[in-house]
Image (cartoon, rainbow, N blue to C red):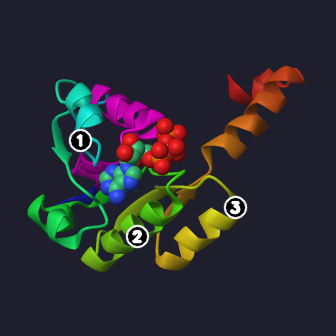
Amino acid sequence: QNKLKDKRILVIGLGRFGSSLALELVNHGWEVLGMDSNPRLVQSYSEALTHTVIADATDDEALRQVGAAQFQRAVVAIGTHLEESILATSQLVDLGVPDIWAKAISRRHGRILEQVGAHHVVLPEHDMGERVAHLVSGRMLDYV
Ligand code: ATP
């Protein structure tokens, strides 16, 4: 299967970051499986996302059951729960998911995620802080 044409993605963690990302991908025609261990959160996105599942992403049996290994892409959108973020990323690496994106809340967290095997690490708060600095200092041309 052509990797570029495979518009299926697993999004783990439906907090502010994960839910925005998941909804945006759905708007762009992606098939999104949203996973969170919080049933109320999963319930609230069950209409908007393609598929949703209540599951603990650190549990390899649960990941196997939802077919996580079949995804070409996954995002670990867990930040504050550092241990969960690291364990969930490590599970996806073990399953051989070839394109893993992980959110970090600090550079040190990001470094650990890279060491664990995440292919891309994003630091939304650092990055957005830098962008806003450019915007407030009038260098908007960079971003239009
Ligand atoms: P936000 O994106 O809202 O800023 P955050 O960075 O503070 O979130 P967390 O609150 O740690 O990140 O986690 C985001 C979501 O991931 C939460 O909804 C939480 O329920 C979910 N989550 C945490 N651990 C797991 C896990 N092991 N399995 C599945 N979902 C999890």
In the image, is residue 129 above or below residue 85? above
In the image, is residue 50 above or below residue 111? above
Q: Where in the figure is residue 75, as x and y percent of width and height? A: 38, 53
Left or right: residue 109 versus residue 117 is right
Disc 1 packing (10 Å; few <14; some 14–19; many ≥20): many
Q: Nearer the viewer, mark 1 or mark 2?
A: 2
Q: Is mark 2 within 8 Å of ligand 1?
A: yes
Asked if residue 138 lies in the magenta stretch, the reply is no
Residue in view at x 52 percent, y 51 percent: 79
Q: Amino acid type of disc 1?
A: Val
Residue in view at x 15 percent, y 70 percent: 61
Question: Dots 1 and 2: beta carbons under 8 Å?
Answer: no
Q: Where in the figure is residue 90, as x and y percent of width and height? A: 39, 74
Quadrant of the image occupied by residue 64: bottom left
Q: Is mark 3 within 8 Å of ligand 1?
A: no
Return the mark for residue 87.
2
Quadrant containing the N terminus in the rendered view: bottom left
Gap between marks 1 and 3, in whole Å?
28 Å
Return the mark for residue 107.
3
Residue in view at x 23 percent, y 39 percent: 39
Magenta stretch in the rendered image: 4-27
Quadrant containing the C terminus in the rendered view: top right
Residue in view at x 49 percent, y 55 percent: 81
Disc 2 packing (10 Å; few <14; some 14–19; many ≥20): some
